[in-house]
Image (spheres, rainbow, N blue to C red):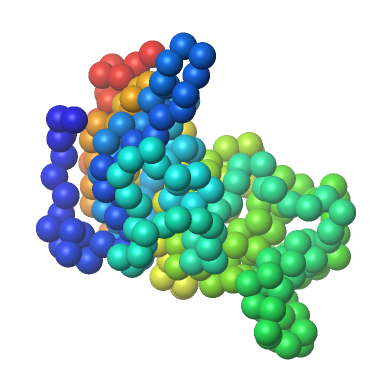
Amino acid sequence: METLYRLDPQLTATHHLLINGVSKAYPTANGTHVVLEDIHLEVHRGEFVCLIGHSGCGKTTLLNMVAGFTAPSCGEISLNGMPVRQPGPDRMMVFQNYALLPWLTAYQNIELAVKSVYPHKTRQRRRQIVAEHLELVGLTAAAHKRPSQLSGGMKQRVAIARALAIRPEMLILDEPFGALDAITKEELQDELLKIWRTHKLTVLMITHDIDEALYLADRVVMMTNGPAAHIGDILNIPFPRPRRRSQLLEDPQYYDLRNQVVDFLYTRFGH
């Protein structure tokens, strides 16, 4: 693979997540289908990284391997120097479709995760953890409502609270705000950034929204088209934190960066 970007030497020395030469292929009736090929990425602790690319470029496949749901065909993924072989509480994934159990309340969905990871904690302590995280995402009043009684934004808040309640080192987000209206999306983006800063999480997130990526991320990883997709370029986002949308939209550099992503997706790798 032609390397179109340079990794920061400091990141190389302090990486938290290491994706080293990873490829993923599946057997089909017509031969082997290569989804991803020779992926190299280093993410340091506390970094917010967004993956962007056209549908079918293997973004979700890559996140599933980081989460431990599936294994690479070759190469290795490690967290803190330890190979990722299976799912674990150090990595929690939030899906676009919320993945809540419909027969449980918001409280019970979070409690189930806490009980699974911390079976030896007292019931009182587990309740305290659940209550703290419902409050964190502003859902204390909706604690005893089932998913069918919640809006899309509220469901996603429950999913985020459930992920955070077990204190993961890494939050893995698969286009979590893609199905939400614009106002709710912006509210949850700001809430996510506040949680990320408070808990010092490492975040790896898929998005199809260029403006979302530029607002949230420290780096934007741009994927080439599949099959055999790879990392085509990585964009470093220079804006200081905390960020304000209004200030970004007045910054000429914002539009320069946006145009770079647009050029990559729609000129160099447009369908």
76 with respect to 11 (left or right): right
Q: Is residue 212 visible?
A: no
Q: Quadrant of residue 214?
A: top left
14 with respect to 17 (left or right): left
**Residue visible at 33% across and 27% down?**
229
Quarter of the image containing the C terminus?
A: top left
78 with respect to 31 (left or right): left
- Residue 205 spot, x, y in % from top left: 45, 47
**Residue visible at 61% across and 42% down?**
96
Q: Is residue 142 above or below residue 66?
A: below
**Residue visible at 46% across and 11% down?**
30
- Residue 221 spot, x, y in % from top left: 31, 41
Nearer to us in this view, 233 or 151? 233
Quarter of the image containing the N terminus?
A: top left
Nearer to us in this view, 161 or 38? 38
**Residue visible at 16% across and 34% down?**
4
259 with respect to 97 (left or right): left
Q: Quadrant of residue 220?
A: top left
- Residue 219 spot, x, y in % from top left: 29, 48
- Residue 54 spot, x, y in % from top left: 42, 25
Q: Is residue 235 above or below residue 113?
A: above
Q: Quadrant of residue 178?
A: top right
Q: Is residue 227 visible?
A: yes
Count up the numbered dots: 0
